[in-house]
Amino acid sequence: MDATHWQDVSDPDLLAAVAASDAAAFERLYQLYEKRVYQYVCTLIYDPTLAEEVVVDAMTAVWRGAGSFSRSSRVSTWIFGIARHKAFDALRRTGRHHNDVALDEALEMPHAQESPAESVNRKQVTSLTQQALKTLSREHQEVLRLVFYEELSYEEIAELLSIPTNTVKTRVYYAKQRLKHQLKQFGQGERV
Amino acid sequence: MVEPDTLDQPIHPEGALLPWYLNGTLREDERRQVDQHLSSCAACRAELDELAQLNVQLHEVYAAQSEPSSRLQRAVLGQVALEASTKGAKSASGPQRLKGLDEWFRSLFAPRWAPALVVTLLVAQLGLLLWSMTRPTLLDQVTTRGLGAPTVRLRVVFQETASERQIRSLVQGLRGRIVDGPTSDGAYIMEFPAGDQAAAQKKVDVLRSQRESVRTVEPVTQ
């Protein structure tokens, strides 16, 4: 039985099959989550090679620990939780914890060299947003991604980050404010 | 980084929920509450517009992010395949071991063992019985000279003048003993070891030769 057999199976059922040591089910689950987990880890770790090592660790941990999934949360939240844990382990191990862009320092980043907002095209807007994002702290980048791309609820984010729901709301609010501020600095403020 | 639990400027509670209003994860009651608020709050409507535009831009950024290398998939699936094969081998050997243990336990009660076990126990019991019978006991150490080796019984009448010491010395010298008497005519029945008739006669002769102590000696007919 190959991964295509599991094409239309829900994430919880896939994980149940993985718990029963079904390697094909795992392959399907991996296909669904590889990019999302890798990019989420890249939000936390700026080194692509180290990020890939973390994904290997995280996904093999998913394989080994699938039986411990309780279905009380979404599969995505559970997998991201494992990936986050592994990412912080890697940061501690490699001593890169302090290389992040701090929140206060982010405001002091040099301005981008791109053209004014009136002349940028769609691609450039994306590029500016990407650069503005990079100036944010890891925590702000993380919550923005979890809300707008992974579409997690504030309760799920609170559980994943082990912080109160009110802190989630304020963190997202300030992250959005910082991003808006950076986009203005880069000359694209009037678009947001 | 420590985030404050409250916002530093007046923000409507519903405004703080707008990111999740946008991503569609609010509970129904929360969504209705935000809807109601938006209908009457221009600031929050503007905030929602901003978030919607930001949402589009962020999606484009995330979609354009670099993808993992092909090595990553090979590494993960290779690792899992390896562990799956090991796990399979282990799970196969697990029941095998359990089955073996079960068979061993059952074999203890298998009928083919029963006859052998009974025979073994019987032999052991018989051996124990024989051993206990042949083992010398304290009772065996008390000798009864009338038993065992052949003896001759003699009816002996001692001289009136024979002292006890003379009689004892004579009896001990011949390794005999007084088994009965004295009778009404003063005779004692004495028993001496004698393997055959000649030995018995020799005992009689010795006794008769002791005239100072022995008056008469006669064999006792059984």
Image: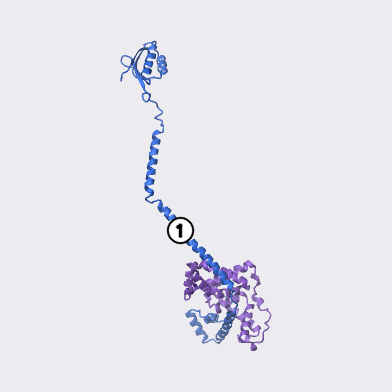
Chain colours: A purple, B blue
Residue B134 sits in quarter: top left
Q: Position of residue A77 (x, y in %)?
A: 52, 73
Residue B195 sits in quarter: top left
Q: Position of residue B22 (x, y in %)?
A: 53, 82
Q: Secondary structure at mark 1?
A: helix
Is residue B6 in view? no
In the rendered image, the vertical position of residue A2 relative to residue B161, given as above or below:
below
Q: Position of residue A17 (x, y in %)?
A: 47, 69
Amino acid at dot 1: Gln
Mark 1 — residue?
B96
User: What crowding class fits label 1: few (fewer than 14 Cα within 10 Å), some (14-19), or many (20 or more)?
Assistant: few
Of residues A191 and A14, the one drawn nearer to the viewer in this rendering: A14
Quadrant where the image shows the C terminus of chain B: top left
Say left or right for A95 vs B216.
right
Quadrant where the image shows the N terminus of chain B: bottom right
Is residue B170 in view? yes
